[in-house]
Amino acid sequence: MNYSWLEDVKVQNVGQLKPHCFYSFDPALRLSLNGTWQTKHLSKVSSPFSDDFQKIEWSNCILPSKIDLNPSPYSAPDSEKKASQRWENYLYKTTFGIKPQEALNQHFINFEHVSGISYYWLNGDFLGFNKSKSIEIEFDVSSIIKSGENELIVQIFQDVTSLYKTPTLGSICLYSLPEKYIRDYHISTSWSELNGAAFDLSVDLIGDANVEVTIYENDHPILIKDCLKNLSVKNLFLESWSFEYPKLYLLELCVIDQSGVILQTMTQYIGFRSIEIVNGLLYLNGKYLCIKGINRSAPYGQLSMINDETMLLDIRMLKAANINTVINFDHPHRQKWYELCDKYGILIIDHVPAQKSSDALLRSAEESENYHLANVKSMFHRSKNHTCVIGWHIGTENNFNLDTSFHWIKSKERKRLVLLSQERPKGHSDVYCPSYLNVDQLSAYVYSNPSKPLILSKIDNAFGNSLGGLKTYWDFINNNDCLQGGFVDGFIDGGIKTSDGKWDYDSKYDVKGILLPDRTPHPTYFELKKIFQEIVFRIDQEEQLIVFRNNNLFEPIIGVIEIRIWEAKQQLFFQRRNFELPAQASELITYNLDNNKFSDSVFLDVRCFMNNGELAGEEQFILHRKTAEIPSSKRTLVFPFVIAPNLRKLPSQMEDEKKNILENPPQYELTEDYIDEDTLCIQLKCQVTSPLPRFGVKIQLPKIYSQVSYLGRGPHENYSDRKSSAFWGQYYTTPEKMIPSYIIPQESGYRSENEEIVITDLHGNGFRFTSILPFGFSYSPYDFDQYKDRSTFPKTKAGLVESDHYILCIDRYMNGIGGVLSSEDESIYQKSNPENYAEFTLYISAV
């Protein structure tokens, strides 16, 4: 066996079939090879049939394999080491049976996903070799397979620097085809309001036969045509497909021999839609399209292991968050994923697998060119027949063969987009796709008289507690037509559950998502949902009018609208009525309220529900803010707990910790004075010599004080620059429930803009905290003062040890969560106080 291929830059694969579209198999012609396999492991390069392997006993494993982290990956090897010292050698074996009559068919083995560099054997005959671990692998085994028992061996070489204990393998199957069959086909659809639906079909047919093309609607044939190789059909007055209304028709291709016998039937659900750029703007079915997107990625192999139920849950979570487009980022996505996106309406940009040196030892331009173009071709062929796919992303400007890749796809498909992540708007991309631009850079593009729409391939990274500043950023995008949205980077955290049920991870760069791996939402999920909602509201408080608009492209919203006006102690107004709002239309609603009778802060909440009960959109307006008063209580206050200044803000997952560290802490003055016997007044003052990341106090409270109620923003965590989804309300919780389940320890659990906090024991005895101005707070079972800096944090949240006390932090101000989008670089005191003088007054009373 030629193991020099491991290091040969000119060899990418041997013996594999050319890539083709996803197939829909007749279950009778498909044999799953998933289940129990046997495996061996050897830490050297050696043949499966060598004495080295013969000495090792087989053990059982289950395929598709699970993700298994290596807690102690081998250190990076010296580049001068020999190949035999660079690789971990894994062997997998299974057997399967074939009946005599079945052995006469054409047989193919398909590997949905294999990590590492792999070699394959069937019945002792060499099948082939694969170096690109990001594409499906398929072999024609018709001449090798036999009736009776067959033995399949897969050998995978994993780099010793791998971060996984073992390779990962996806679904594996054997399928059969007749002597004359469709090897590949390509259908490209379009739709216009004037000319209706149209499609172009090309068929790669093996053997002398005819193909009958039928399109069904609800099991009724609406078109029947013959096709030898190519077929074009226009002016079909059928309904369009969109992410709002994903109307599908069934395409059936039947291979029929000269005597009229049906040899093969292939089916595919298709939709008719147009995606085009007109006058520098992107349109879907003739309507201006704003991409509200997210990058769906995960550590290598995880996406290929996701079952159908989890993928359907992902679709539901995407739809509920008002996300209309997904980039299939970095790694292979299963065929079922595309089918679900077709069915439920998610636009897809397929992304070529990331080109990394560790993927296939890409140490030369020549190898990189071959590797990248092969992946582009495979990516295109796999998904080309799915209506949900509106384009293909061919990588970044650092990739090779961009000109060839762009023109190769355009030669196959001109009705969809080809995208490229780039720093400049010129080049091989139908749209300008930069990453991480700030508002000033967006503004410069707006005023540059652009010829292409701008869609951000990465708006910001969803690393744990993140997305600070997204609301202001998105408002700017909405106000400029040539800015047509973009993608938040990270849908699902790349965490793995350990044997004790706790979350772990390989790299902190993998822990990037608005959902935990079990699909529990982070607070960032709710923020994205609110910002992306298609119903928007405005208020005219003087005229007592609410204007709400349906920004859907095609679909009306039919349901119920609720308006509630309330203050802390009572509801002041409530209205509920049915409504039907067409797409791109607005409606006015009036309310009646005497604005002169407000004593407390007053809020107006408006919510729209679909007839199925799902929330279509919501908004909150502050009608009045009360004038704060010094609290009074009829109970004598005893507060023996230490109150200390708190100027430290913990870093979020990827935040630069240095900006939260004060090299020269300011001088401060902290005083405690009783007002009568029932109220304690705390005053913190300091001269600000540099921006303050935080300005407040910290108090340790005994754990008997476990009940929290507060009037402020909630119910989930929120910050000064990430709060649009957190509405004012009266909330009840506990310290443990206030902390989100981020996998990596970081700043978390904060609540901004509060009027009062009440903390009590189980009997209702405790303390009320108020201030003249709204304030932020957190109440946590963890004391991070025991950690000097981020480097001393435990790796995961599961490693945090609860304190003997609860830690209450109350702040006049704390910096927002920050991020690429946030412009909040300085403390509010640096901005608003010409004399750089900071003061915070807090009142504590008994309850």
Image (cartoon, rainbow, N blue to C red):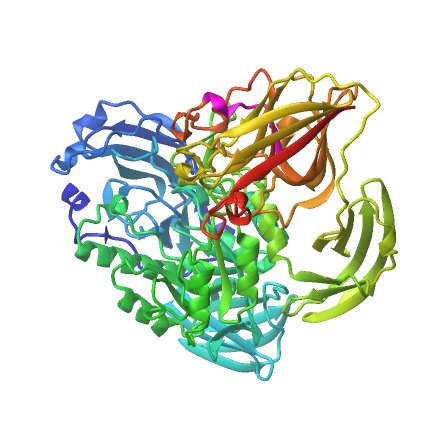
Camera sees residue 741: no
Q: Does residue 151 lie above or below 703 as drawn?
A: below
Q: Position of residue 147 (x, y in %)?
A: 35, 44
Residue 29 lies in magenta, yes or no? no
Q: In the rendered view, does 35 fall on the left or right side of 809?
A: left
Q: Position of residue 63 (x, y in %)?
A: 42, 36
Which residue does the image show at 56% across and 38% down from the upper left?
838
Q: Quadrant of the N terminus?
A: top left
Residue 785 lies in magenta, yes or no? yes
Q: In the rendered view, does 838 fall on the left or right side of 415?
A: right
Q: Quadrant of the C terminus?
A: top right
Please name whichever residue, 141 or 469, is drawn nearer the observer in this view of the structure.
469
Which residue does the image show at 23% across and 59% down from the upper left?
369
**Splitting the image into 4 quarters, where does residue 121 fall?**
top left
Q: Position of residue 263 (x, y in %)?
A: 46, 64
Please name whichever residue, 665 or 473, is drawn nearer the observer in this view of the structure.
665
Q: Does residue 450 lie above or below 784 as drawn?
A: below
Which residue does the image show at 19% across and 30% down from the upper left?
44
Q: In the rendered view, does 844 fall on the left or right side of 239?
A: right
The magenta segment is 777-786
Please name whichever residue, 363 or 104, is drawn nearer the observer in this view of the structure.
363
Q: Position of residue 203 (x, y in %)?
A: 41, 71
